[in-house]
Amino acid sequence: MSVWYAIPSARSAAEAEPQLAKWRSMGYRMALWRELDADPIQCDFTLSSANYPGYHVATNKLCQEILSMDSAANWIVIGGDDMDPDPTKPPEEIAAECNEHFGGTFGVMQPTGDRWSFDGRHVCSEMVAGSPFIGREWCRRMYGGEGPLFKGYWHFFGDEEMQELAIKYGIFWQRRDLSHHHHHAMRKGGRKAIPQSRNNGAMFRQMEAIFKQRRAMGFPGHEPLA
């Protein structure tokens, strides 16, 4: 069994490498989406394009490649290049626990041991599936086989939609005994390292409007393959 960490990364290699090395050292295989001219980072494979398609499309493509090339990949973790892996358990052990809990790989498990709250009231890791273990069957079947995330979002709200859908199907598991520490820039009073044009209030409000409309309609198009 293999477990992958699959993410787009816009940070410089100097910034991202210390974080991503933690995942490799714990035993995760790694797939990255990088800009064409970005400095290379050690990983198992990299995808890129002239125009970044957004977090959700890029992550879906990474997951599709993983499922195609690695028949032993039963669980894929998504998140960001500013997160730590759980330091207490190797990924294969966590994956085996997920297999047992869900009775297979149609499931989503979110570690919630990182208790950071951006507003002092809501624990971020409990609000959305921001760094989940996603089972192979979820990746293969959701959205009619297009991937684990809704491709219509650019950067925000796909994690919230995933959590709501996993709850709907009764296959969502939050584990406080595991932690993906998020070195979010807001913890240090700074900004998250994504291009400024994509990380602004207008973009957030646009994605929020899409999410609210989709939620009211039951998230159309999410239906899994049989």
Image (cartoon, rainbow, N blue to C red):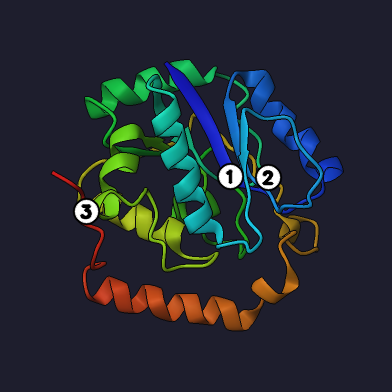
Check disc 3: other Cα within 10 Å, few if <14, some if 14-19, many if 20+: few
Foreground of the two, 70 or 154 = 70
N-term-proximal mark, 2 vs 3: 2
Residue 67 vertical position relative to residue 211 in the rendered view, above or below: above
N-term-proximal mark, 3 vs 1: 1
Specify the amino acid type for callout 2.
Asp
Foreground of the two, 146 or 11 = 146
Specify the amino acid type for callout 1.
Ile
Residue 118 vertical position relative to residue 41 in the rendered view, above or below: below
N-term-proximal mark, 2 vs 1: 1
Q: Tell me the quarter of the picture where residue 7 sits.
A: top right
Single out the mark in the foreground, 2 or 1.
1
Mark 2 touching mark 1, by CB under 8 A?
yes
Foreground of the two, 163 or 137 = 137
Tag of residue 81 = 2
Which residue is denoted by mark 3 in the rendering?
168
Specify the amino acid type for callout 3.
Lys
Secondary structure beneath label 1: strand
Check disc 1: other Cα within 10 Å, few if <14, some if 14-19, many if 20+: many
Foreground of the two, 225 or 121 = 225
Which residue is denoted by mark 1 in the rendering?
7
Inter-mark Cα distance, 2 to 1: 7 Å
